[in-house]
Amino acid sequence: MAPAAERSAQGYDVIVIGSGAAGLTAACAAADGGARVLLLEGSDLIGGTTAVSGGMAWLPGSAEHGDDRAAASRYLDAAAPCPPSPARDAFLDHADVARRWLDARTSTKLAAVPSYPDYDPDLPGGTLRGRCFAALPFDGAELGAWFPRLRPPLPEFMLMGGMMVGRADLPHFQNVLRSPRSAARVASLVARYAFQRLRHPRGTTLFLGNALAGRLLKSALDLGVTIETGAIVSALLPGNGGVAGVEIAGGSAKTRTVAGKAVILASGGFSHDAELRRLHLPGAAQKVTANVASPGPTGARLAEPFGARIEAGHENRAFWVPGSTFSRADGTPGVFPHTVTDRGKPGLIAVDATGRRFVNEARSYHHFVMAMLEDAPTRTPAYLICDADFLWKYGLGRLRPFRLSTRSERRSGYLIQAATIGELARRLGLDIGTLEETVAGYNAGAEQGLDPAFGRGGDAYQRHLGDGAHRPNPCIAPIRRAPFYAIAVQPADLGTAAGLRTDARGRVLDGSGTPVPGLYACGNDMNSVMAGFYPGPGITLGPALTFGYLAGRDAAAL
């Protein structure tokens, strides 16, 4: 990589701010279009929240996988209702185009997940498969010296201090003591990991969002994108009637300016801007975010001097997940996002401060938090409750399955344990009689696999998150074997949904609806085409890839 002074003298056509899926895709699209591209990342690591995510992208309209635009449009009209917008139409028109471009022109290979339902699959246009895509596994060693600069997954999602496990291999780890075939597979994976650790700081076999970020980074490097980390953009430079470059504070030189024909904002939204959170998010959701911090001003802050503003008309202005908080052994704070690992499994309920259930626990994480926010004083925090069988088989929050000891989590207060439901209620500060009645009422239906109160397991998505081997309802089992356990969850955001208003090409619009020349936004810096709803897996990454492609391509043509 050239020295900072030399790079500044060279000049660039397109400058991208942020290195998540949106920023990296935009950089790749611009470079593929012939532009000289500079990508700036404020932190020391590449990948943003994408690198620690599940990595799924909702990309509708693929005839190859049995979908079409009309069905996807009907589904969004029902699951994410909002007035028609050019940006949503552009997403529906180009999601599959962007996917096929990534496959043809970059190292970012996406495969359809064989079975993953939309979050409301029974609505018009809903489907059980064909819209959810994930990056193929990736060997991080292909990044060479850049691999240590790829943001690692959350420690809670790795084994043995640095080993990722693909979804297909999870059953082998669960059956390692019962199946010779699984034991052999696990032994092979562990041996491979041990060999990788001889030369690398963690395992190089990447899955999920880390594979997606790694593939996009490899693509950007192959296309000649110049990448700087630790480079905080402090301001956008005016010129040519709009934006004509950036001011950079930090990195390998003092504050400097870099000219460019276009700037693409992909900083990840305002999850870490305290003032914008106060203005746009509910009071009960101010404290916890599962979004990875990126130093420096957000895209919305940078665009303010040019008349751009955050759109505030959404149903929700963030994408929600219940999060449990803790401190790691090294003292760093942690947030565990309760997306798919525990809530839908059989033998868990969620209760509020009254000791009563308030939600179908197996619905999507966004729906779960929406229910919390409907009565925040009573439901913040909420408590996930299970028994010993559940904890052993499925884990709970940051506790993985088959844990022989829970002492450290109990000592820290993350996990509450009690010999009886009444004792658990007392330790949580809940009414003893009410919680006992709640569990007894739930168990009465659970013995037959029923949930008369909330209909848990009532659609294909809920059953998908359950335990397919458990009958008759993969989401329902009694809570009966002591000891009993609970953890507290708070409303947390995975990212913000309210962002800068853009047109169908990703161009940022000012207050009058006119494009700001030379300024684009994508990812969470862009106002979400989902209008604050969460209709399926990967509805942040799908638009991020699509509008990264559209913005990068358009910017390169300036």
Image: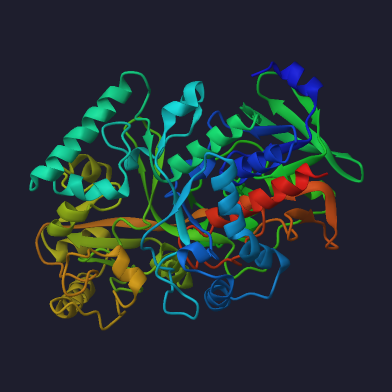
Q: Residue furthest right?
A: 241
Percent across and percent down for residue 196 are: 32, 24
Residue 277 in view in this figure: no
Tag count: 0
Q: Residue furthest bottom?
A: 452
Percent across and percent down for residue 268 are: 60, 46
Relative horizontal placement of residue 501, taking residue 434 as reference (left or right): right
Residue 517 in view in this figure: yes
Asked which quadrant contains residue 183, the reply is: top left
Q: Quadrant of the N terminus?
A: top right
Asked which quadrant contains residue 35, the reply is: top right
**Picture residue at 56% right of the left edge, 53% below the top:** 99
**Picture residue at 30% right of the left edge, 47% below the top:** 398
The one nearer the camera, 455 or 305, is 455
Relative horizontal placement of residue 160, taking residue 149 as reference (left or right): left
Q: How is the image coloured?
A: rainbow
The one nearer the camera, 494 or 550, is 550
The one nearer the camera, 242 or 290, is 242
Residue 261's place in the image compared with 456, above or below, is above
Q: Quadrant of the C terminus?
A: top right
Relative horizontal placement of residue 145, taking residue 187 as reference (left or right): right
Relative horizontal placement of residue 151, taking residue 238 as reference (left or right): left
Residue 412's place in the image compared with 197, above or below, is below
Percent across and percent down for residue 280 are: 63, 60
Residue 213's place in the image compared with 69, above or below, is above
